[in-house]
Image (spheres, grey):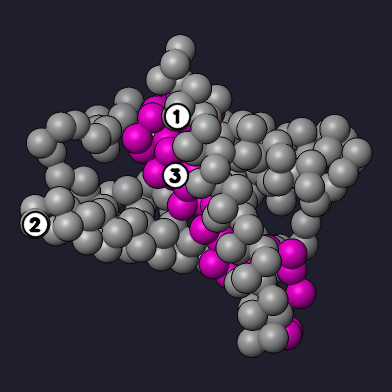
Amino acid sequence: MKALATETTVVTLCYLLACLVAFELLMPIQLRVFPGVESDSSLLFLPHGVKVLAAWLLGWRATIALFPGVFLVFLYFSGASVLEPPRIAAMAIAVLVPSAVFHLIKLAGWDLSPYSGRRPRWASIMFAGFLVSVVSSVLSNLAFQSPPQDYFVYLIGDFFGLFFLSLILMFLFRALRKHQMR
């Protein structure tokens, strides 16, 4: 139980930090650079990377670990309407789909689970993240009855968010390993 509490705290903090960067730093830049993109979706949605990496590392425990951060972000942006059916559906999609996709991939015979001594297959994890994005995009946009253009912005933002977050983490961990070797 203590491990789950630690995982939940770490994932929640990472999710909140990723949302802060995406919405408070990157979105204002996006609105200036791409004024024609009329969407509330970020073209570099780092929280998708947190969801995918949490699901890859934690499996179904990621559902619990993601919930507090996802709920707090929805509460921040929608206030009391956080309990309206489309938002409840979107929160459920956000926390359930990543783990479900990794589980289905494993059932199909393609185990991407991290094991000690086994190098991550980043291209496969990116593909799984793309599948998570497709399923999440379709379900979330159906829940909110969004226009078709939002699907594409959502997919682009998720893909680049996962890609850049993975890249940042790879460089960070590489630097930490070099520092520890000294």
Residue at position x 71%, y 51% in the image = 141
Residue at position x 71%, y 46% in the image = 73
- The reply to whether residue 111 is visible in this rendering is yes
In the displayed structure, does residue 71 sit left or right of residue 49? Answer: right
Q: 124 or 17: which is nearer to us?
A: 17
Instruction: Residue 49: give x, y in percent of width and height.
Output: 46, 52
Q: Which residues are magenta?
A: 34-63
Please name which of the two marks, 3 or 2, marks the residue nearer to the observer.
Answer: 2
Q: Secondary structure at mark 2?
A: loop
Count of number-bearing discs: 3
Taking 122 as reference, is 22 above or below it? below
Pointers 3 and 2 in contact (C-beta within 8 Å): no
Taking 134 as reference, is 22 above or below it? below
What crowding class fits label 3: few (fewer than 14 Cα within 10 Å), some (14-19), or many (20 or more)?
many
Residue at position x 42%, y 49% in the image = 129
What residue sits right under mark 1 in the picture?
A: 7
Q: Quadrant of the C terminus?
A: bottom left
In the displayed structure, does residue 18 sit left or right of residue 68? Answer: left
Instruction: Residue 46: give x, y in percent of width and height.
Output: 52, 58
What residue sits right under mark 2 in the picture?
A: 182
Instruction: Residue 125: give x, y in percent of width and height.
Output: 32, 48
- Mark with earlier residue (3, 1): 1
Please name which of the two marks, 3 or 1, marks the residue nearer to the observer.
Answer: 1
Pointers 3 and 1 in contact (C-beta within 8 Å): no
Q: Residue furthest top?
A: 1
What crowding class fits label 2: few (fewer than 14 Cα within 10 Å), some (14-19), or many (20 or more)?
few
- Mark with earlier residue (2, 1): 1
What residue sits right under mark 3 in the picture?
A: 52
Instruction: Residue 168: give x, y in percent of width and height.
Output: 35, 63
